[in-house]
Amino acid sequence: MALPVEGEKIQIHSYKHNGNIHRVWQETMVLKATKNIIIGANEKTLVTESDGRTWLTREPSICYFHAEHWFNIICMLRDDGVYYYCNISSPFVFDNNCLKYIDYDLDVKVFPDMSHALLDEDEYEQHRLEMNYPEVIDKILQRNVKTLVSWIEQRRGPFAQDFIESWTNRYILLSEIQANKE
């Protein structure tokens, strides 16, 4: 799997278990890419839903994707603090200038005070039945919800204060470099 390079702009494609496209983020700047982790950032990027509706993201976001964990984390930088939207998902693959993953419906929303809530359990149950999620997938997803919650409680990875500061600064620097080239 070829990896993107720092400063490169990629798309993010989210799929459902049945292979149908779920959502596409038009442009995300790569801040770091290794075989296990891709960290990106975007702001006011166009998002296209599976039904063709489009919208723009509202605030700058730092995006964290892992090739071994079954979740990804979007850190939304708002005036009143950092909010996190965590998708329970397959590990990412990078293919044809796109980061791709399967969205498994369950989400964890984390607030600036690190309180959190599990969302969309009803949607997960509906899609689990409709798309016949194998039992092994269900077990992996439930285990990864627990792993994610432990990361939140321990302030690990993207939930650590220095993560947000360092990657936001990197995004600002790379954006300025690119603006000066144009």
Image: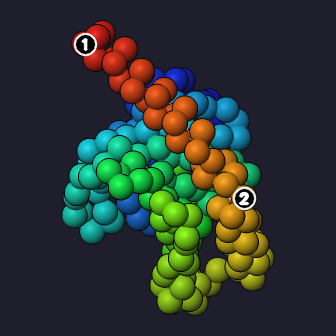
Q: Quadrant of residue 35?
A: top right
List the residue tagged with mark 2: 154
In percent of width and height, residue 166 lies at: 55, 32
Residue drawn 39% across and 27% down? Answer: 172
**What is the total number of numbered labels drawn onto the structure image?**
2
Residue at 52 percent of width and 23 percent of height = 6
Nearest-to-viewer mark from 1 and 2: 2
Q: Position of residue 116 (x, y in %)?
A: 55, 72
- In the displayed structure, 113 sits above or below 165; it is below
Q: Upstream in the sequence, badge 1 or badge 2?
A: 2
In the image shown, does 168 or 33 lie closer to the viewer?
Answer: 168
Which amino acid type is shown beneath numbered disc 2?
Gln
Residue placed furthest toward the top: 181
Q: Is residue 75 visible?
A: yes
Camera sees residue 24: no
Residue located beneath label 1 in the image: 182
Above or below — where is 109 with respect to 128? above
Q: CA distance from mark 1 to mark 2?
A: 42 Å
On the picture, is 160 further left or further right than 175? right
Q: Is residue 155 left or right of residue 17?
A: right
Image height check: is 131 above or below 1? below
Q: Callout 1, which amino acid?
A: Glu
Contact, mark 1 vs mark 2 (Cβ under 8 Å):
no
Secondary structure found at label 2: helix
Observer-nearest of 111 and 54? 111
Q: Which residue: 55% across, 70% down?
A: 115
Q: Give how far across and how far down residue 23 sits, in percent.
A: 38, 60
Question: As rendered, which of 116 and 36 lies closer to the eye?
Answer: 116
In the picture, the quarter occupied by the C terminus is top left
Horizontal and vertical percent position of residue 63? 50, 46
Identify the secondary structure beneath mark 1.
loop
Residue drawn where x is 67% and y is 68% of the image: 149
